[in-house]
Image: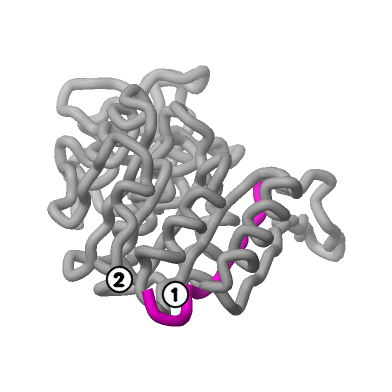
C-alpha cells in the first residue's frame, strides 16, 4: 500500500530517532537534519527512503500501534505498550469481545482494545473528565482516521455501565474497588476483570475487595518489567536503562450467579 494524503508516517533518521508525521501534499517536515518534503513520501511504499535538504537520509514507515502510543499527544497518563500486551493477553481480549473500559485517559489502551476486539466486538469506554474524553476522542480519530463504529465513549462513572452485557472489564482508575463491588452484583459469571493501578496500596485494596465480595476467583496481581539488550558484535549486554515499574495488574474472574 502506497502512502496517501492523510496517512500517518514514522520517519526514522540515521541515529534511530523517530518522528511521527501526518502527510499532506505541499507540506514539509522540519528537524535539525533539514526539511523533508511530504511529496517525496506520498505515493511511495512502506519503507521508502527520502533525503532532507541537508543530504540526510531518512526512512518512512507506517507506524505500528506501539510507535503511535509512544509518540501520541499526552493528556492523561498513557498506558505503555509493555502493560497493554499483558492486559490483552491476561484479559483474553480478542475478536468479538465486549469490553467495558474506564478511564479512557489519553486513548492508548482504548486503541489497543478496539484493534483486539475487531469490528464484530464492542468497546464502551467511560471517562470522568470531559477534557480527557475529548482528548482521547481526537487521539483515537487520528489513529484510525475516524471514530470506529464499534466504540462508544461516555462521560461519567463506570459503575453506571456495569452490566451482564460485557464479558470483559478493563479499568485504569485510582479506586477500582468501587467497580469491583458493583460488578459483584451486575456482571455475569465468567466475566474477566482487569484493573491497572500504580501503587501497592491500590493493589491490596482491590484484591481485598474482590475477596470480600465472594464473587471473584483466579485473582492474580503482578507487574511487568521491560529491559532491552545491546548487541554489537561480541559485546552483548543489558541496556543501562530499562522500563521498570509503571503499574500493577490485578486480574480476576467473576463467578457464581449475578
Tell me, yes or no, whether the highlighted magenta stretch contains residue 79. Answer: no
On the rendered structure, is 112 left or right of 134? right
Q: Earlier in the sequence, mark 2 or mark 1?
A: 1
On the rendered structure, is 35 left or right of 39? right
Here the colouring is one colour
Q: Is residue 63 visible?
A: no
Question: Which residue is the site of mark 2?
Answer: 97
On the rendered structure, is 258 left or right of 82? left
Q: Nearer the viewer, residue 233 or 207?
A: 207
The residue at the point 41 percent across, 36 percent down is 106
Where residue 182 appears, x then y in whole percent?
A: 43, 56
Where residue 246 appears, x then y in whole percent?
A: 67, 45
Q: Circle 1: is it few (<14), some (14-19), or many (20+) Cα within 10 Å?
A: some
Q: Is residue 197 visible?
A: yes
Tell me which segment is drawn in magenta: 247-258
Q: Using the rendered view, name the quadrant where residue 212 is placed.
A: bottom right
The reply to whether dot 2 and dot 1 touch (C-beta < 8 Å) is yes
Q: How far is the residue under mark 2 from the one under mark 1? A: 9 Å
The residue at the point 18 percent across, 50 percent down is 148
Tell me, yes or no, whether the highlighted magenta stretch contains residue 255. Answer: yes
Q: Circle 2: is it few (<14), some (14-19), or many (20+) Cα within 10 Å?
A: many
Where residue 69 appears, x then y in whole percent?
A: 45, 43
Q: Nearer the viewer, residue 204 or 23?
A: 204
Q: Secondary structure at mark 1?
A: loop
Position of 55 relative to 168 (above/below): above
Question: Which residue is the site of mark 1?
Answer: 92
The residue at the point 35 percent across, 64 percent down is 186
The residue at the point 46 percent across, 36 percent down is 71
Amino acid at each position: 500500500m502506497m502512502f496517501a494524503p492523510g496517512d500517518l508516517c514514522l520517519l526514522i533518521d540515521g541515529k534511530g530517532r523517530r518522528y511521527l508525521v501526518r502527510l499532506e501534499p505541499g507540506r514539509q517536515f522540519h528537524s535539525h537534519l533539514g526539511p523533508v518534503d511530504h511529496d517525496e513520501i506520498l505515493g511511495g511504499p512502506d519503507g521508502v527512503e527520502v533525503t532532507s535538504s541537508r543530504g540526510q537520509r531518512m526512512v518512512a514507515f507506517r507506524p505500528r500501534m506501539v510507535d503511535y502510543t509512544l509518540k501520541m499527544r499526552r493528556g492523561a497518563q498513557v498506558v505503555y505498550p509493555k502493560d497493554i500486551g499483558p492486559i490483552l493477553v491476561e484479559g483474553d481480549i480478542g475478536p468479538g469481545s465486549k469490553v467495558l473500559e474506564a478511564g479512557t485517559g489519553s486513548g492508548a489502551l482504548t486503541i489497543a482494545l478496539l484493534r483486539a476486539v475487531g469490528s464484530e466486538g464492542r468497546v464502551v469506554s467511560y471517562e470522568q473528565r470531559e477534557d480527557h474524553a475529548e482528548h482521547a476522542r481526537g487521539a483515537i480519530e487520528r489513529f484510525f482516521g475516524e471514530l470506529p463504529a464499534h466504540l462508544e465513549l461516555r462521560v461519567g462513572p463506570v459503575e453506571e455501565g456495569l452490566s451482564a452485557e460485557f464479558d470483559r472489564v478493563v479499568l485504569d482508575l485510582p479506586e477500582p474497588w468501587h467497580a469491583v463491588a458493583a460488578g459483584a452484583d451486575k456482571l455475569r459469571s465468567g466475566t474477566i476483570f482487569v484493573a491497572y493501578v500504580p501503587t501497592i496500596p491500590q493493589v491490596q485494596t482491590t484484591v481485598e475487595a474482590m475477596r470480600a465480595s465472594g464473587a471473584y476467583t483466579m485473582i492474580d496481581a503482578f507487574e511487568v518489567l521491560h529491559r532491552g539488550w545491546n548487541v554489537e558484535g561480541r559485546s552483548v549486554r543489558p541496556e543501562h536503562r530499562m522500563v521498570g515499574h509503571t503499574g500493577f495488574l490485578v486480574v480476576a474472574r467473576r463467578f457464581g450467579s449475578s
